[in-house]
Amino acid sequence: MMHAVVVRSYDKGPVYEKVEEPQPQGPHEAVVEVLAAGLHHYVRAQADGSHYTSKDSSGLPLIPGIDGVGRLADGKMVYFVAPDTSFGTMAEKTVIDLRRSVPLPEGADAVRIAATMNPAMSAWVALRRRIHFEQGQKVLVLGATGSSGQMAVQIAKLMGASEVIAAGRDQERLESLRARGADVLVSLAGDIGEAAARLGEAAAEVDVVIDYLWGKPAELAMVPMLMKRSDRSRSLTWIQIGSVAGASAAIPSAALRSANFQLLGSGQGSVTAAGYLAEFPALIEAILDGKLQVHAVTCPLSKAEEVWSAPSSAEQRIVFVPGLDSGANVKFIWSR
């Protein structure tokens, strides 16, 4: 037996309890000791059934968790994405598909990788797999004060954006993004129409929008941004990734007819599993080289029930470390 975090009802929080150790079933499967697993927004949504990939109650009980860092029986460390089963990563051990994992250098900081990979992956894959992004292009990050948005600002700059415009509601977090690569800040606080007008003034000349908000903020900003472009025939690509502000947006027909405007999404389904896997090594290298900043906070797996019910923070990335329950000497960092 071992300990894991288990969801038995979408209406109740996860419970820390004993479960049977998992066993590999196929030739590509292996058991790993989980060293670190991040509590991402995706994982919270997975646990309450609200994520767009969530199954109905027939998928319960569920051990949440979508990725992590583990140690194989031969001692090698790997970063892995959990298989599409109900046995996730919030456990002392889990089963992985070796084809969905990549090796890590010995001594790699498991917590930094577990904290950063998921929130960084969305913008990284969007700019490398969904479009042909060129150095020198200008980028607007809509929803830049969320954890993924903060990563997107850094990633756009890392990939050679000449200007990154960060737009968000939280003024303190917005100001902190100057140190992470943001050249222009746009507040989305207050009246939503006035915020859209501010975006029209500040972001009219961008080449790419990375959108974590959608809903009314996106809907109202499209036309002001397009109408103020100096050359409407120059391409503007809007990449829809998140829907924090609403699951739907009414796209004005004028936005599609009056400018060279392309709207697309990026996420599971629009990029193949092989496409994601191919991006892992380069992203891991950037993380280990310290090119992406993250504030990682470690937590024993046994404290999961307390942490889950606490308000989430875009400033911190909680990482569960099962070894902390056993008193193991776990290497971790606090990085800003």
Image (tube, helix red, strand yellow):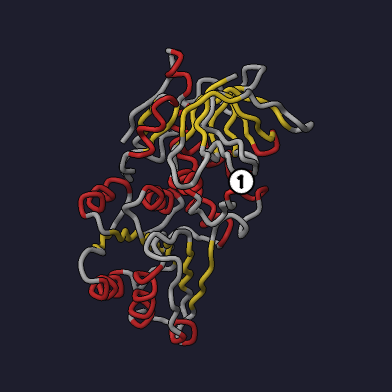
> In the displayed structure, would residue 72 be above or below residue 271?
above
Residue at which label 1 appears? 59
Residue 226 picture quarter? bottom left
- The residue carrying pointer 1 sits among few (fewer than 14), some (14 to 19) or many (20 or more) residues within 10 Å by Cα, namely some
Residue 33 picture quarter? top right
Q: Residue at x 25, y 47 (%)?
A: 176
> In the displayed structure, would residue 122 be above or below residue 285?
below
**Which percent across, then down, holds residue 76?**
62, 21
Asked if residue 119 lies left or right of residue 56, the reply is left
Q: Nearer the viewer, residue 11 or 290?
A: 11
Q: Residue at x 32, y 39 (%)?
A: 310
Taking the view exactly as shown, the residue that stands out farthest to the right is: 27
Q: Nearer the viewer, residue 163 or 86?
A: 86
Kind of residue at disc 1:
Gly
Image quarter hosting the C terminus:
top left
Asked if residue 182 lies left or right of residue 238, the reply is left
> In the displayed structure, would residue 68 be above or below residue 168?
above
Q: Residue at x 55, y 62 (%)?
A: 131
SS at mark 1?
A: helix
**Which percent across, then down, holds residue 63?**
55, 36
**Which percent across, then down, holds residue 291?**
41, 39
Q: Residue at x 43, y 40 (%)?
A: 13
Asked if residue 93 lies left or right of residue 185, the reply is right
